């Protein structure tokens, strides 16, 4: 009897100690959240400087820094279609001082046969930032003036024309592969570590065409160094209203893109809520909205919960497309 009582008492003490430890840890996390932030925040960006991710992160980051009272340190980590950056975020301390900037390729990385080891549950959705379309553009020397003319030219060209994208397995790569099947032509894929270097090679004549996001291509379209043929959205874009849609050319096709912020899993809910509130506040500023629109995007806001749902639905939307094209995400 005494032995049983001793065992029971010991178990109760252990349980009480565990509960006390959990309470203390929760109190420490709550205190840390209230003092947040007390040092600079590192924002890991998934693509190179001058790309859409970089432009949007720096536009928002300036306002975040002012509101949070701490510097935002931008850390561009391009490569593997965003997987390198996302892996760094996932492995970071969940203290709120490492923020991840994600874009459309994030939704393509969680297939059943992915080899990089990342899981969607490694991340916490913070909030949506913007949405934007993609388009097909060609080098100014290519003798076509419309998407129909491009398809006819590509069907006859031998060897087939080349096209650049922001990376193998990315949204632009997959979109062009789907469009090739729709329109019945061949083109050789040349992957880059982002849209910016691909556009540079397009302007230099080293590739014939590109499937790119509008924000990355827009400065070069405005300068006349890149010739846009069609935009992959339902209606014409107000930033470049003279560029027809794929549907107007006879191939109804949309390739929407998005941008948002994530934390590594485990960041306290109070910090996630605070960061979301500051991002939303920044996006609601008229000057920020205007700057984002001039970059070819539309500002979008959401709660962390709504953004998490958005991401899960987008991952599900792309899964059959990845399978049909035969692309496996890897590092």
Image (cartoon, rainbow, N blue to C red):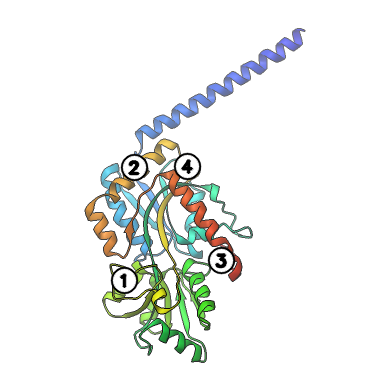
Tell which circle, 1 or 4, labels the residue nearer the N-terminal end. 4
The span from disc 3 to disc 2 (Cα, nearest Å) is 34 Å
Q: Nearer the viewer, mark 3 or mark 1?
A: 3
Q: Nearer the viewer, mark 1 or mark 4?
A: 1
Residue 277 is marked as 2
Q: Quadrant of the C terminus?
A: bottom right
The span from disc 1 to disc 4 (Cα, nearest Å) is 36 Å
For the residues labelled 1 and 2, say whether their Cβ atoms are less than 8 Å apart: no
Q: Is residue 1 above or below residue 176?
A: above
**181 to the left or right of 141:** right
**310 to the left or right of 62:** right
Tell which circle, 3 or 2, labels the residue nearer the N-terminal end. 2
Q: Which residue is mark 3?
A: 321
Tell which circle, 4 or 3, labels the residue nearer the N-terminal end. 4
Q: Which residue is mark 4?
A: 94
Q: Quadrant of the N terminus?
A: top right
Task: Answer few, some or many: residues within 10 Å of disc 4's Cα (few below 14, many 20 plus, some between 14 and 19).
Answer: some
Tell me the element at label 4: loop
Q: Which residue is mark 1?
A: 218
Tell which circle, 3 or 1, labels the residue nearer the N-terminal end. 1
Tell me the element at label 3: helix
Tell which circle, 1 or 2, labels the residue nearer the N-terminal end. 1
Tell me the element at label 1: helix
Q: Is residue 252 above or below residue 86?
A: below
Tell which circle, 4 or 2, labels the residue nearer the N-terminal end. 4
Where residue 91 appears, as percent x and y from the top left, is: 52, 49
Where residue 59 appears, as percent x and y from the top left, is: 29, 56
């Amino acid at each position: 009897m005494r032995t049983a009582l001793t065992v029971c008492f010991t178990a109760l003490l252990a349980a009480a100690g565990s509960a006390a430890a959990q309470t203390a840890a929760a109190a420490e996390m709550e205190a840390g959240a209230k003092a947040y932030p007390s040092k600079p925040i590192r924002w890991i960006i998934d693509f190179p400087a001058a790309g859409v991710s970089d432009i949007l992160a720096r536009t928002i980051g300036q306002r975040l820094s002012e509101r949070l009272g701490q510097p935002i340190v931008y850390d561009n980590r391009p490569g593997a279609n965003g997987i390198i950056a996302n892996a760094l975020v996932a492995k970071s301390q969940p203290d709120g001082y490492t923020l991840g900037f994600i874009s459309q390729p994030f939704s393509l990385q969680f297939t059943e046969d992915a080899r990089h080891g990342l899981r969607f549950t490694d991340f916490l959705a913070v909030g949506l930032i913007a949405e934007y379309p993609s388009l097909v553009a060609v080098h100014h020397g290519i003798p076509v003036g419309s998407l129909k003319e491009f398809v006819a030219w590509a069907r006859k060209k031998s060897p087939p024309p080349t096209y650049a994208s922001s990376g193998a397995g990315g949204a632009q790569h997959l979109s062009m592969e789907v469009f090739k099947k729709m329109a019945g032509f061949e083109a050789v894929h040349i992957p880059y570590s982002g849209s910016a270097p691909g556009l540079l090679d397009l302007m230099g004549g080293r590739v014939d065409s590109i499937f790119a996001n509008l924000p990355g291509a827009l400065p070069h379209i405005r300068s006349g160094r890149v010739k846009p043929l069609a935009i992959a959205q339902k209606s014409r874009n107000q930033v470049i209203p003279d560029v027809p849609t794929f549907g107007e050319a006879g191939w109804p096709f949309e390739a929407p893109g998005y941008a948002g912020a994530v934390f590594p899993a485990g960041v306290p809910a109070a910090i996630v809520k605070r960061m979301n509130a500051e991002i939303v506040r920044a996006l609601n500023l008229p000057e920020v909205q205007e700057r984002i629109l001039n970059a070819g995007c539309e500002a979008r806001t959401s709660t962390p919960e709504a953004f998490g749902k958005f991401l899960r639905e987008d991952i599900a939307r792309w899964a059959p497309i990845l399978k049909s094209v035969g692309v496996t995400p890897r590092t």
